[in-house]
């Protein structure tokens, strides 16, 4: 497995460059009753497209759903489902289901804003809404582990299309908050870029304030206004986000991940990680959910 690398800063002032997707995984497989993980919570987004698969024992009962806040959220066959980052859910499957999934991240979007603006799963439309892109992606994947450049581009296209459909339903007030988070005001650009490039190092408000030519109190107010959290909360969220992705998509040890993302020791890392992800790093790494 290739080592996880920290993305470079991707903030831009241009509105056209607000969205960047990082694709972690794309695959198609068959799921069954073993698809039953509890308390799943990830720092990346998921996209699901299911089709009922022929089953000799239960041909008409095959179905998959997720459960959020004890409420079932069915995933109808041939519909595209988005599960935003940080949504906690359980998995439930009956019979055999042909299951296509994407794991990806929306770069530059603060975790707090994701939690506020995308608090639950979304059914964004039937696969027919996507023209030939979603069916073609299913054909290209076919359970293959190695992705071609063509497949990667198509997977990103499907993810972008799903996001566009989700955003079309978003109230205008939330859309304004989203764009402000993706396109932070010039006052805190320097701080956000410095944080992205130096997550492994100590990061303190006085340094960030000097970079932005602000007082510490002004810096905190700007972060609260634009991102909905203090600089310290934002930094911890970014560290946990990247650490969770490294636990899933790399072979680095937990100690290596803790050091690389700025945690002073494994104990502090475990405590901070468990508070946000619901389980400690070791348990999170063992959990395999597609």
Image (tube, rainbow, N blue to C red):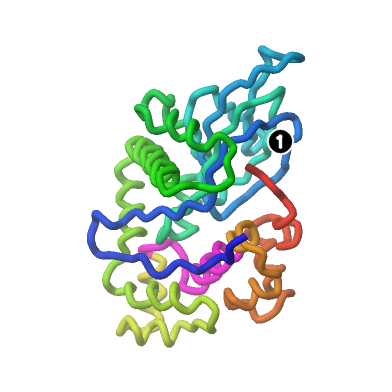
Q: Report the number of numbered marks.
A: 1
x then y, percent, for residue 194:
40, 78
Is residue 213 found inside the magenta-colored segment of the image?
Answer: no
Q: What stretch is highlighted in magenta?
A: 225-243
**What residue lies at 60% left-to-right and 58% top-to-bottom?**
249
Residue at image mark 1: 35
Question: Which of the 4 quarters of the picture holds residue 34?
Answer: top right
Magenta span: chief secondary structure: helix
Q: Can residue 129 be seen in this view?
A: yes
Question: Which of the 4 quarters of the picture holds residue 186?
Answer: bottom left
Q: SS for tag 1?
A: loop
> Could you tell whether 54 is left or right of 161 in the image?
right
> Could you tell whether 130 is left or right of 89 in the image?
left
x then y, percent, for residue 124:
43, 32
x then y, percent, for residue 210:
36, 87
Q: Can residue 163 be seen in this view?
A: no
Closer to us: 221 or 75 = 75
Is residue 236 found inside the magenta-colored segment of the image?
Answer: yes
Q: In the rendered view, would you say 72 is above or below 44? A: above
**What residue lies at 71% left-to-right and 68% top-to-bottom?**
270
């Amino acid at each position: 497995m290739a080592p996880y690398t920290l993305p470079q800063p991707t903030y831009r002032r241009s509105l056209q460059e607000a969205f960047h997707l990082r694709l972690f995984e794309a695959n198609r497989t068959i799921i069954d009753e073993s698809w039953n993980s509890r308390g799943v919570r990830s720092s990346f987004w998921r996209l699901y497209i299911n089709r009922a698969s022929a089953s000799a024992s239960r041909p008409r009962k095959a179905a998959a759903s997720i459960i959020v806040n004890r409420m079932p959220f069915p995933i109808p066959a041939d519909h595209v489902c988005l599960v935003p980052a940080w949504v906690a859910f359980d998995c439930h499957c009956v019979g055999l289901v042909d299951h296509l999934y994407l794991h990806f991240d929306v770069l530059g979007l603060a975790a707090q804003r994701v939690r506020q603006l995308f608090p639950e799963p979304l059914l964004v439309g039937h696969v027919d809404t996507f023209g030939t892109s979603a069916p073609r992606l299913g054909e290209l994947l076919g359970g293959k582990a190695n992705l071609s450049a063509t497949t990667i581009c198509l997977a990103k296209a499907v993810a972008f299309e799903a996001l566009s459909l989700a955003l079309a339903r978003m109230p205008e007030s939330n859309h304004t908050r989203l764009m402000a988070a993706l396109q932070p005001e010039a006052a805190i650009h320097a701080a956000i870029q410095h944080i992205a490039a130096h997550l492994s190092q100590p990061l303190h408000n006085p340094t960030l304030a000097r970079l932005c030519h602000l007082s510490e109190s002004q810096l905190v107010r700007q972060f609260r206004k634009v991102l909905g959290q203090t600089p310290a909360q934002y930094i911890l969220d970014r560290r946990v986000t990247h650490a969770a992705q490294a636990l899933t998509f790399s072979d680095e040890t937990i100690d290596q991940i803790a050091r690389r993302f700025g945690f002073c020791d494994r104990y502090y890392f475990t405590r901070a990680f468990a508070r946000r992800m619901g389980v400690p790093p070791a348990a999170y790494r063992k959990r395999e959910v597609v």
